[in-house]
Amino acid sequence: MSKILLIEDEAAIRRVLKKIISEENDNYQVEEAEDGLIGVDMISKSDYDLILCDIKMPKMDGVEVLEKVKKIKPEIPIVMLSGHGDLDTAVNTMRLGAFDYISKPPDLNRLLNTVRNALDKKELVVENKILKKKVSKKYEMIGNSEAISNIKSIIEKVAPTDARVLITGENGTGKELVAHWLHEKSERTKAPLVEVNCAAIPSELIESELFGHVKGSFTGANKDRAGKFEAANGGTIFLDEIGDMSLSAQAKVLRALQENKISRVGSDKDIKVNVRVIAATNKNLKQEIEKGKFREDLYHRLAVILIKVPSLNDRREDIPLLINFFSNQIASEQGTGVKTFSANAIKLLQNYDWTGNIRELRNIVERLIILGEKEVSEKDVKLFASK
């Protein structure tokens, strides 16, 4: 059933339009509002698939209705109803986000075609939202443990916002998966997620990598170059291992967070950026602050939301699911059949001390698939996965 709201101050026109639309399709449920104020109130309290709105009305005109609805429920298509003298205004409403406008008295076929097209658009918008919320299999978080369930719950709440997130945890726990989930479930998913491994970049180059540089600013700077913050504009930048970032680079990151602008190395020109920052570290940043190696003001800017990713030893109940996931993933990558693991083999792996966490588990699963029998046994684990 498609719910349609008709906002029109003239009762006779409401009655005629409601009859025409309702008789066109039994799945069209038409509700009425006699002015813009009532209409906006109804929209705020209920879900509609389409709004038909007159432009000239007392109390609140159609342009005001359009602007308010686009703020509270932007996904709802709005078709404006315009009298002869309202055509210029009707055209302007298209710039403000209206789906279409229809002159009064309306042509029957045009009215019904517009209603159908607008409802089709609403359905596509809903489908796209659902698809956007589905995270790529490559970055799927596997596990039903309480710790992982809690992280997934936090991500669902935090991802649609622009809140900064600091992800902590040991090496190999999957901190980058959390970052990808946060981005892919956010409103920035159409823009890039730019990853920077702060530990892998020499300290003398980290500022250039993050903020770019101008030609001649240092030896080897043969041309102007944009940095990662500019590349991530409109999207998300993931600063992995931020605890390894130099203090001078930290100062520039702090400025970017405070003022939403950066400057390239060797330049005084400010560049505005709109970037969501997600950071991760395997270090205890509070201890790093005490040692004078990390800025306390930057820590508080980054740690709006804290997510701690548990070690594999703290979520052993997820190991059978992870083994199955990696077995299927590796078989797909190598073009081979999927190998199963015996119950005893899985139990033995659950009891290992996983110092390398999920990364280590995947490596051992791949080794067992290559070297083990058709069904990986306890004996295979003891032979090829000894710790």
Image: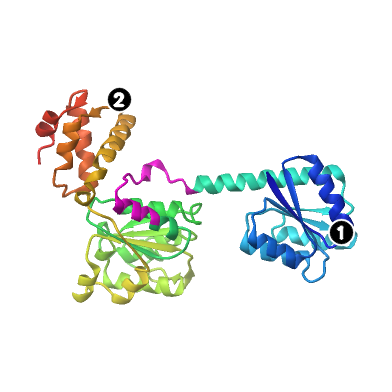
Residue at x-position 38% and y-position 71%: 266
The residue carrying mark 1 is 11
Checking the image for residue 66, the label placed there is none
- Quote the CA–CA distance across marks 1 and 2: 69 Å
Checking the image for residue 336, the label placed there is 2
Residue at x-position 20% and y-position 44%: 360
Q: Residues within 10 Å of mark 1 (few under 14, many from 20)?
A: few
Write the start and end of the magenta stretch as one range.
Answer: 133-153
Quadrant of image for the N terminus:
top right
Q: Residues within 10 Å of mark 2 (few under 14, many from 20)?
A: few
Describe the colour scheme in one phrase: rainbow
Asked which quadrant contains residue 75, the reply is bottom right
| Tag 2 secondary structure | loop
Residue at x-position 37% and y-position 66%: 216
Front-lying residue, 381 or 302 = 381
Disc 1 + disc 2, Cβ < 8 Å: no
Queried whether the magenta region covers residue 150, the answer comes back as yes
Mark 1 or 2: in front is 1
Q: Is residue 51 visible?
A: yes
Asked which quadrant contains residue 86, the reply is bottom right
Q: Is residue 12 left or right of residue 156?
A: right
Residue 209 in the image, given as x and y percentages of width and height:
35, 61
Q: Mark 1 belongs to which amino acid?
A: Ala
Residue 350 in the image, given as x and y percentages of width and height:
18, 41
Placement of 364 over or under 128, stated as above or below: above
